[in-house]
């Protein structure tokens, strides 16, 4: 049986160590953080397809989003809507951070837009939900968005 090594394993096992020099494990040991955004559906104007529900900023440089640990929850009886988590940079360019998810009076985990994409957000990018089909909306229902992310930046 052959051993197959990752680049990290090779760097760790072949590094020169001394009192003053040691390989950095920082990229492997990032704390996972969660950002929570809440929105209460008003009686008017309500939600419609193609609306942008602006959430806010993460305020972390090169933050990597972990969609599989992020979720959207409907706290109440009336929110059935398709949503996609996106970011918008200072130039106005919008980028999908997740695939579309259907929130149907429940809690739904998000998914990557592509298996090969690690969604990344800059400090000046704001996050928003792009609304797709809105089937149900009830005033007073709270939509809770929890976004998991990590960054090498220390706060």
Image (cartoon, grey):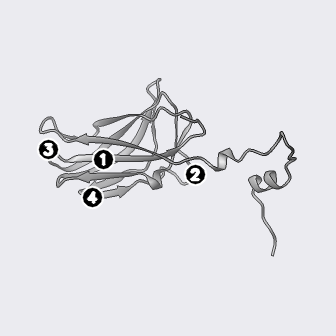
The disc, 3 or 1, on the residue closer to the chain's N-terminal end is 3
Q: Are marks 4 and 3 in contact (CB under 8 Å)?
A: no
Left or right side of 96 for 12: right
The disc, 1 or 2, on the residue closer to the chain's N-terminal end is 2
Residue behind mark 2? 116
Tell me: residue 37, above or below residue 57.
below
Residue 52 image-quadrant placement: top left
Secondary structure, mark 2, is: loop
Viewer-side label of 1, 2: 1
Viewer-side label of 2, 4: 4
Mark 4 to mark 1 CA distance (whole Å): 11 Å
Q: Are marks 3 and 1 in contact (CB under 8 Å)?
A: no
- Residue 147 at x, y percent in the picture: 42, 46
Tell me: residue 115, above or below residue 119.
below
Viewer-side label of 2, 3: 3
Mark 2 to mark 4 CA distance (whole Å): 28 Å
């Amino acid at each position: 049986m052959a051993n197959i090594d990752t680049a990290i394993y090779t760097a760790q096992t072949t590094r020169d160590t001394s009192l003053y020099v040691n390989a950095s494990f920082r990229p492997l040991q990032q704390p996972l953080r969660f950002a929570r955004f809440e929105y209460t559906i008003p009686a008017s104007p309500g939600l419609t397809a193609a609306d942008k529900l602006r959430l806010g900023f993460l305020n972390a440089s090169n933050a990597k989003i972990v969609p599989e640990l992020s979720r959207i929850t409907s706290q109440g009886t009336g929110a059935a809507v398709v949503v996609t988590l996106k970011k918008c940079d200072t130039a106005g360019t919008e980028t999908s951070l997740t695939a579309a998810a259907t929130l149907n009076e429940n809690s739904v985990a998000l998914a990557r837009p592509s298996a090969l994409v690690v969604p990344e957000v800059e400090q000046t990018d704001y996050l928003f939900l792009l609304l797709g089909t809105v089937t149900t909306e009830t005033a007073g229902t709270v939509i809770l968005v929890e976004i998991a992310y990590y960054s090498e930046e220390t706060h």
